[in-house]
Amino acid sequence: MSLEIVLVPLAIAVTKEVVEGIANRSQKNDQDYTVLPTRMKDESLLQQALEEWSCSFRKAETLDSLQTNNENEVTFIVNEEGCYSLVLPKTADIKAFEEWIEKVEGSYTHYLQQRVYQHLLEKAKEQGMILEKEELLEDHSIQLTYLVNR
């Protein structure tokens, strides 16, 4: 008996919600900042993705506690759902940052998939499953086929 597991890139499922979230960006009451919501929740993965784009990470507790950004430093706040939102000054080129945050989310998704993949391999091994075949599909998903011993 074999069991097949397919890991589909998370970016496909998230893309629609990211675009909708960007379209629904909110602004602080005094219009000093624009907030671009994201789907990213894990701080360590976010930091890793930002490093790939030569940016440092800074987290603010609230919009009121924000200070001006240094070059190549971006500021995030955590929203009600536990996701990080990018905070930009009202003078920022929003369109350019929307494109940039999409790229960062792509990197984040890649690191998240790696973590899930490693976790799955470890759990399957703990359960006594034997990896029979691992295949990278055209859509960049990974298909794992395990032998299940009972």
Image: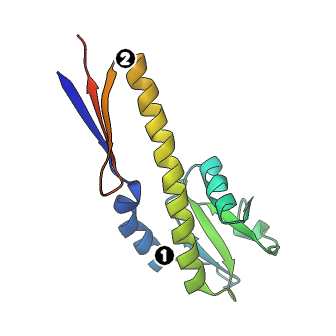
Question: In terms of secondary structure, where does tag 1 sit?
Answer: helix
Give me the residue at 67% from left, 54% from top: 47
Q: Where is residue 112 drawn, in percent x and y?
A: 50, 48
- 134 to the left or right of 3: right
Q: Is residue 26 visible?
A: no
Residue 50 is marked as none
Query: Is 66 drawn above or below residue 135 in the view shown?
Result: below
Which color mode does the image show? rainbow
Label 1 Cα neighbours within 10 Å, binned few <14 / some 14-19 / many ≥20: some
Q: Where is residue 58 drawn, in percent x and y?
A: 75, 61
Question: In terms of secondary structure, where does tag 2 sit?
Answer: loop
Quarter-of-image position of residue 150: top left
Return the disc, 1 or 2, that comes first in the chain's sequence: 1
Which marked residue is nearer to the observer: mark 1 or mark 2?
2
Count numbered badges in the picture: 2
Residue 22 is marked as 1
- 141 to the left or right of 104: left
Comparing 61 with 52, the one in front is 52
Q: How far apart are marks 1 and 2 (CA)?
A: 41 Å
Q: Where is residue 21 drawn, in percent x and y?
A: 45, 71
Query: Is 19 drawn above or below residue 3 in the view shown?
Result: below
Q: Name the residue under label 2.
A: 127
